[in-house]
Structure formats: structure tokens, C-alpha cells
Image (spheres, grey):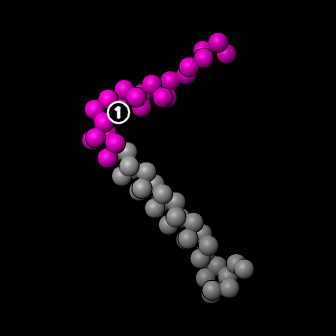
Amino acid sequence: YLGTQGDVWDAHKDMALASLGGFIAMAITLFIHSRIQKDFREQWTLSLTVKNKEY
């Protein structure tokens, strides 16, 4: 399979572009939510904190 299209890096380029597209989509979603929800920063911080500190 690798190199059947004449470019041995074709699969790597496809995966890099897919990852870049996913990152851009997540960044756009983050920007939209931060503008719409007023308490987004507080919720974001709360979701990243450790809930059970017994360990």
C-alpha cells in the first residue's frame, strides 16, 4: 500500500493534514464557546482541576 501512488510520504501527509484540520476545528469551537458563554473560562478551569485529591 505504501508508495502505490508514487509518493512514499503520501499517507504521512494525509495524516498531518487530518490532524491540522482537527486542531483548527477544535480551535474554532473553543473560540465560539468562549464568546457565547460568559462563564466559559471558569467552567474550563473547573473541568481541569483534580476532583479527588486523596491520591
The C terminus appears in which quarter of the rendering?
top right
Q: Where residue 2 appears, x then y in whole percent?
A: 70, 78
Q: Check if residue 8 falls in the magenta segment.
A: no
Q: Where residue 5 appears, x then y in whole percent?
A: 63, 86
Q: Where residue 42 appears, x then y in whole percent?
A: 36, 26
Number of residue marks: 1
Pick the residue in front: 10 or 18.
Answer: 18
Q: Check if residue 49 falls in the magenta segment.
A: yes
How many other residues sit within 10 Å of disc 1, few (<14), some (14-19) or many (≥20)?
some
Picture layout, residue 2 above or below residue 49: below
Residue at the extreme top: 54
**In-image side of 34 versus 20 (left or right):** left
Pick the residue in front: 51 or 13.
Answer: 51
Query: Disc 1 marks which amino acid?
Result: Phe
Q: Which residue is mark 1?
A: 40
**In-image side of 13 versus 3 (left or right):** left
Q: Identify the residue at horizontal 62%, vertical 87% (top origin).
A: 6
**In-image side of 45 versus 51 (left or right):** left
Q: Identify the residue at horizontal 38%, vertical 49% (top origin).
A: 29
Q: Identify the residue at horizontal 37%, vertical 45% (top origin).
A: 30
Picture layout, residue 4 above or below residue 45: below
Picture layout, residue 33 above or below residue 4: above
Q: Identify the residue at horizontal 56%, vertical 19% (top origin).
A: 51
User: Magenta residues?
Assistant: 32-55
The picture quadrant where one finds residue 4 is: bottom right
Looking at the rendered structure, the secondary structure element under dot 1 is helix
